[in-house]
Amino acid sequence: MTNRRTVFALALTTAALPITAIWRVGAQTGGPPPVQTTTLVLGQSLPGLNDAEKADFSAGLASFVTTEQRSDGLGPVFNGTSCGECHKAGAPGGAGLDVGVARVTRIGGIVNGAYSDLANFGGPVLQARSLREFDLSCPISGEVVPREANFVSLRITTPLFGAGLIENIPANTILARIGMRDPDGISGQPNMVTNILTGKIDVGRFGWKAQHSNLEIFAADAYLNEMGVTSSIFPNENLPQGRPIPPGWGSTGGPEDEDGDVAKFSNFMRYLAPADRRLPITPRVTQGEAVFNGIRCGACHTPVMNTGPNPVAALSNKPVKLYSDLLLHRMGPGLADGIQQGQAKGDQFRTAPLWGLSRRGFFMHDGRATDYASAIMTHGGEATAARNRFMSLRPPDRDALMAFLNSL
């Protein structure tokens, strides 16, 4: 692509520098101010990559933080001008740093008795910005929620650390957890989605409702719906509010991803190291882990799974300490957003991985919670019993649980 500039002037030199993570126990529990800090590194590549894989990671990082221009295919409507604009908490690839910037609106509705993404009205993802902010002659404004929308859901940016490891957890490992007898009635379900590159059905792993199984498709979807740039995977331009694009403001024909950015984004995510380095594991943290298991949070937040064999040594047969089963669970009416994606129903969400939890500022799919206790309290549905056990914890056990969560 041409005429591009870098959004973070120092991104390539600072992405892998250590950051200071604060042990936020006091802030999470209402206790004394935090007093302990440690140094963690985010944004590095996976250990064990060969030179070619390291080069792919670096090229992907450069593309990830580069601002798209109109000449690159940006727009005509979009939510961000680069991946790094929204994925930057801690390092490029992180969660959203500012919930106001890194939160988008997804809509759906019922048409003729069936669920619809409302593509004819701008759905499923609304783009809040348009090329008008760069050129006042642009006749297109950012999209707004149409009256046809029955369901409106805010979604915050998910962190991408360790995405390649998640992609390489064998489907059978994930599916093996289905049908296990659970005393709380927990019964996770996979979101079985079609890989449009191969035509095969696979287990969804990425997105709040596990709607994507593959990093190329995940990247291409974001490229189109967040930046308005088409690719060979998604070659059709978004129609602003479902209306035709005025001449001169849409694609000039053919996919706009001329430099293979989707592949570069995928390589960056695939080779990005996980956020699994822990803060100090003190006796209090160890006590909190026992509380976590005792109230059965681990029934969904599976501490570790393993990748299968892979030609990339850094991805082959590795432990993935993600604290998620990657399955869909019914979360009750308090969290239900009505949005359906693949086989995921309106009250179902993928178990959010907890690794890197201490480096995030907002929790749940819409960022409604800003501390761990509030996030736990929003849980319902299959998580009701675990939530109720949390509510009945003695203060020392609750504080220990917060210390454990903040060690992740």
Image: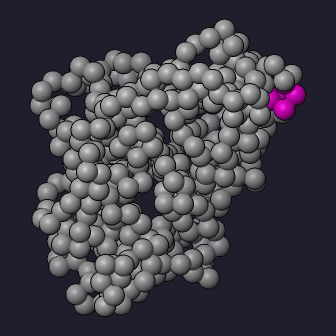
Q: Is residue 193 left or right of residue 182?
A: left
Residue 266 in the image: above or below residue 386: below
SS assignment for the magenta stretch, majority? helix
**Residue 304 percent across, percent down from the top left:** 51, 21
The quadrant in which residue 244 appears is bottom left
Instruction: Tell me which residue sits at (47%, 67%) in the image.
Output: 125
**Residue 173 percent across, percent down from the top left:** 46, 25
Instruction: Tell me which residue sits at (64%, 41%) in the image.
Output: 329
**Residue 39 percent across, percent down from the top left:** 45, 23
- Look at the image and tell me in which quarter the C terminus lies: top right
Q: Nearer the viewer, residue 319 or 227?
A: 227
Identify the magenta region: 389-393
Residue 270 in the image: above or below residue 344: above
Instruction: Tell me which residue sits at (57%, 43%) in the image.
Output: 361
Q: Is residue 197 visible?
A: no
- Look at the image and tell me in which quarter the N terminus lies: bottom left
Q: Nearer the viewer, residue 82 or 293?
A: 82
